[in-house]
Structures are given as C-alpha cells and as structure tokens.
Amino acid sequence: MYIVVEGEDPGYDIFVNGHALARNEDALEKLAMRLNVKPLLEFFSADQNSMALLLEEGAGDPEWAKTLPPPQWFSPGDGLTTICTMLDHLKGAPATLGSETAPIVAELEEYERVLRKTALRNLRWQLAVSWK
C-alpha cells in the first residue's frame, strides 16, 4: 500500500513502506472501525496508470479495469485523522497487534509525514496497492 499525490511531481519524497499495513489490513480495518475513523482502504482509488501496473503484475481483469470510475482524490486532513487516531491508539496500547504493532507504527509515521507535506502544499492524495 502506498501513497499517490495528485499531479506530476509534488516536489518532495512520497515514498512510504506499506508492507506491514498491507499484511495487517483486516486487523487495521477492524481497529479503524472501533476507533470510529475511516479504514485506510477507503482512501484507495485506481487511476489508469496504477491499473496498468496491476494488470502487468497479473492482478485484475482487463475488462473490469475498463469499468472503473474516475480516480478519487482525498484531502490529506481526512487521511491524517485516520492515521493519527490509529497511531495514538497503537502507541498507547502497543500489544494491540502483537509483534506487528511496531512495524505498523513505523509505517503509519511515514504516511503521516507524507500527508503533512501534502497538506502544506494544498494537494490531494489517494492510496494505491501493489500486489508484487
């Protein structure tokens, strides 16, 4: 799971490691629901470029990809609400996700850093997924 920022080049590094988040997506969705925030996958949107990459990776159906709605872009503030709420909870209760808590916290902190920069530049973002 990684962040895509609207536009060609936002002028800053948007790299995030989303491996632990992807591995624990079900548990994180349940946590988000308990904390009354949007689950991370609600920020997912696929544009033509990301769908082309997924198809190259062997995921998805080319016919289905043609029927996708236009990509959605989200406010960084909305993403920060989810991320910061989850971070606060996980830092206060580090046993929540067992041995996965530390890597998840580290990745959520990367997401927070990127979304704060995105907010400062008044840009929008979306979550993308790679199946590699």
Image (tube, rainbow, N blue to C red):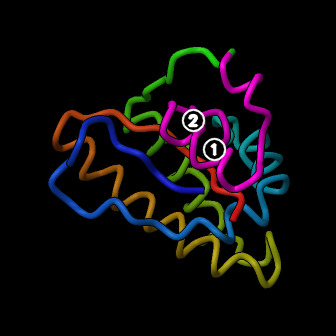
Which residue is under mark 1? Answer: 40
Question: How many numbered discs, if any?
Answer: 2
Q: Residues within 10 Å of mark 2 (few under 14, many from 20)?
A: some
View extreme (bottom): residue: 99
Mark 2 is on which residue type?
Phe
Q: Give the numbered dot on residue 22.
A: none
Q: Is residue 72 left or right of residue 113?
A: right
Quarter of the picture containing the C terminus is bottom right
Do labels 1 and 2 touch, CB within 8 Å?
A: yes
41 part of magenta stretch: yes
Q: Quadrant of residue 65?
A: top right
Looking at the image, which is closer to me, 62 or 12? 62
Q: Is residue 45 left or right of residue 6?
A: right
Calculate the distance from the C-alpha at mark 1 to the C-alpha at mark 2: 6 Å
Q: Is residue 18 left or right of residue 10?
A: right
- Residue 35, given in percent of the width and then of the height, sits at 70, 43
Quarter of the picture containing the N terminus is bottom right
Q: Residue at x 53, y 76 (%)?
A: 106
Task: Give the main secondary structure, helix, strand or loop, of the magenta stretch.
Answer: helix
126 part of magenta stretch: no
Looking at the image, which is closer to me, 11 or 80? 11
Which residue is under mark 2? Answer: 43
Q: Which residues are magenta?
A: 40-66
- In this rendering, is residue 12 above or below 80? below
